[in-house]
Image (cartoon, rainbow, N blue to C red):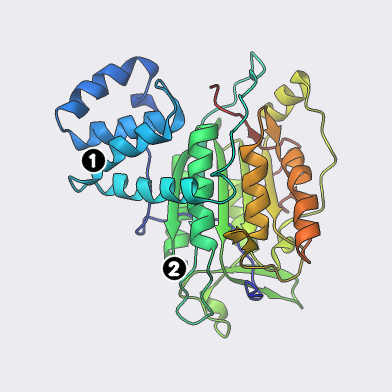
């Protein structure tokens, strides 16, 4: 069994390579499909990319992985970088042993009168470390989750692989500027990190991090202060990394899923973390091509058909991870990050 070292993972995004950007939502209204189709048929690469995105998310077009791949391939063949990267994400989704056999249930109608806001996901997988043992599933987990969040839940996703400390810090500054007060941000991290037992502090490590140089670590306190400063309404950090339990401040109480409760959670600010384990090692692999935690995370989201809050997601995946590993997933609010009793809400896109 390969562990993800003495680490902690969390978030991040960067302007580094392997970034799958989505077109601005304002340009993808339902009445624009024919407009983009005409331009795509003329060979315009950006229009072809936009059609691929529409088919992948079901926004204003039939949701179809096959059609998304068709348009992404036409655009990628002309050198469109974002289309090539989108194909990597879709390939990971289609080839995932967790997602491939799943016939996703039809989404139920979300409660009316609730403004859920726009959804963004920063997805990072670090496999290739310069001074630490390489990991095997982090990048595949990241790509598969990104494809699911885009196609099933309509997220604007960004996929980053093998990013450094400086790239992480620049990304924080960028997303602090980008997000508005009605936005939702999910951050997924799979990779190495480290914990200081005496200080009870967890840290992330970029691919340039080393165990003997604290200057190459990024502390959880930096994450908390950055999340507190963001205007975004809801932020959920999903960490698949050893010793990531130092992020949370205890498990939140179960919440009701009725319409009034959903509306209440949607209004209130949330800064929460879902971690693959407590202050303990976690497995890299062991989950049918994914990590154990990623296997049950992806499975829970793929088989969901209604508005799902973070506590409910935690409940869905916890038993599977416990039974199939020696790690104990955790869920709770992030200390000193400005949590106000809201929760992150996953809203499936209507079929």
Q: Quadrant of residue 309?
A: top right
- Residue under circle 2? 164
Q: Position of residue 218 (x, y in %)?
A: 56, 67
Describe the element under mark 2 as helix, strand or loop: loop
Say above or below: 246 vs 108: below
Residue 199 visible? The answer is yes
In contact (CB < 8 Å): disc 1 and disc 2: no
- Please tell me whether mark 1 or mark 2 is closer to you in this view: 1
Describe the element under mark 1 as helix, strand or loop: helix
Q: Position of residue 333 (x, y in %)?
A: 74, 48
Q: Position of residue 67 (x, y in %)?
A: 35, 32
Q: Horizontal placement of 250 versus 145: left or right?
A: right
Residue 122 visible? The answer is no
Q: Quadrant of residue 47?
A: top left
Residue depicted at x 59% and y 39%: 102
Q: Separation of disc 1 and disc 2 at Cα?
A: 29 Å
């Amino acid at each position: 069994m390969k562990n993800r070292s003495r680490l902690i993972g969390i978030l991040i995004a960067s302007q580094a390579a392997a970034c799958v950007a989505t077109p601005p939502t304002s340009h993808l209204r339902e009445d624009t499909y024919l407009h983009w189709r005409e331009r795509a048929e003329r060979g315009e690469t950006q229009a072809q990319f936009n059609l691929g995105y529409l088919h992948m998310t079901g926004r204003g077009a039939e949701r179809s992985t096959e059609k998304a791949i068709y348009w992404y391939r036409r655009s990628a063949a002309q050198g469109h970088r974002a289309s090539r990267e989108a194909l990597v994400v879709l390939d990971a989704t289609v080839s995932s042993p967790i997602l491939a056999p799943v016939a996703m249930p039809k989404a139920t109608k979300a409660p009316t009168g609730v403004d859920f806001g726009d959804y963004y996901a920063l997805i990072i997988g670090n496999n290739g470390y310069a001074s630490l043992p390489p990991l095997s599933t982090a990048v595949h987990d990241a790509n598969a989750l990104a494809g699911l969040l885009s196609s099933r839940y309509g997220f604007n996703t960004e996929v980053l692989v093998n990013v450094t400390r400086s790239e992480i810090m620049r990304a924080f500054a960028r997303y602090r500027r980008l997000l508005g007060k009605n936005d939702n941000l999910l951050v997924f991290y799979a990779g190495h990190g480290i914990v200081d037992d005496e200080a009870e502090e967890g840290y992330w490590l970029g691919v340039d991090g080393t165990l003997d140089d604290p200057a190459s670590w990024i502390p959880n306190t930096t994450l908390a202060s950055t999340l507190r400063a963001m205007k975004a309404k809801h932020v959920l950090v999903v960490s698949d990394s050893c010793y990531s339990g130092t992020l949370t401040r205890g498990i939140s109480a179960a919440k009701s899923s009725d319409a009034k409760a959903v509306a209440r959670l949607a209004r209130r600010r949330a800064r929460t973390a879902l971690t693959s384990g407590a202050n303990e090692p976690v497995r890299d692999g062991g989950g049918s091509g994914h990590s154990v935690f990623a296997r049950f995370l992806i499975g829970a989201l793929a088989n969901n058909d209604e508005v799902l809050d973070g506590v409910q997601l935690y409940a869905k995946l916890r038993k599977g991870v416990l039974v199939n590993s020696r790690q104990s997933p955790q869920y709770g609010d992030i200390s000193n990050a400005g949590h106000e009793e809201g929760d992150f809400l996953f809203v499936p896109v209507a079929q």
